[in-house]
Image (cartoon, rainbow, N blue to C red):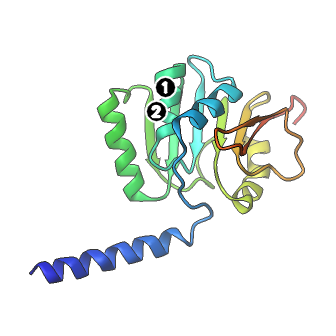
Amino acid sequence: MLLYLGIALAAVTTVWIGWNLTLDALWQPTDRETVRRILFLAGVKEGESLVDLGCGDGRIVVAAAREFGAYATGIEIDPVRVLWGKAWILLTGLSSRVRVIWGNMYSADLSGADVVILFLSPKANLRLQDRLRRELKPEARIVSYYHPMWGWTPEEIGEAKAGYPIYLYRIPEDV
């Protein structure tokens, strides 16, 4: 019986890992110091709306609500990470300010966001650029960790704990 359980678990794990490799961004946990640097660079203010596209386990949205007073939404396509994020939110008591949604970042509603966080791939950033310009309100901030937005000029470039760049962009008034 244990042998069959082990084989089933190995098969599910293999399928899950294989599926994750097909996504536009692989999950890499972001350390707490870098999360704080991302949120400080974004200038997150109490009561603002923050969206983290590809939020993984929800650590950025939890920190945005807990430390900065934001209303934060994470969009994640991996159902295992969504469940993990929802459990974490319940444990922190932040469910009135934070949510993680199982969904596709390419179709998520961004219209009310003051801040959008990206820790994706260059391909994903490129795919999102036009949509961010169209859907975000003027002066909304976009922070991309590690990968720049091609053809955009960052307003500021910060540095993560490990030395990687954190790019801050702002939607101009004339879009």
Residue 65's disc is 1
**70 vs 126: above or below:** above
Residue at position x 46%, y 32% in the image: 62
Residue 70 appears anywhere in the view: yes
Whole-percent x, y for residue 17 in the image:
45, 71
- Hey, what amino acid is under mark 1? Ala
- Identify the residue under disc 2: 62
Left or right of 41, for residue 79? left
Q: Position of residue 112 (x, y in %)?
A: 63, 32
Check the picture and name the quadrant holding the N terminus: bottom left
Q: Name the image quarter holding the C terminus.
A: top right
Name the side, left or right, on which 12 lies relative to 111: left
Q: In this orientation, which residue lies closer to the viewer: 173 or 34? A: 34
Residue closest to the eye, 6 or 101:
6
Mark 2 in CB contact with mark 1 (< 8 angstroms)? yes
Helix, strand or loop status at disc 2: helix
Q: Is residue 144 above or below residue 172?
A: below
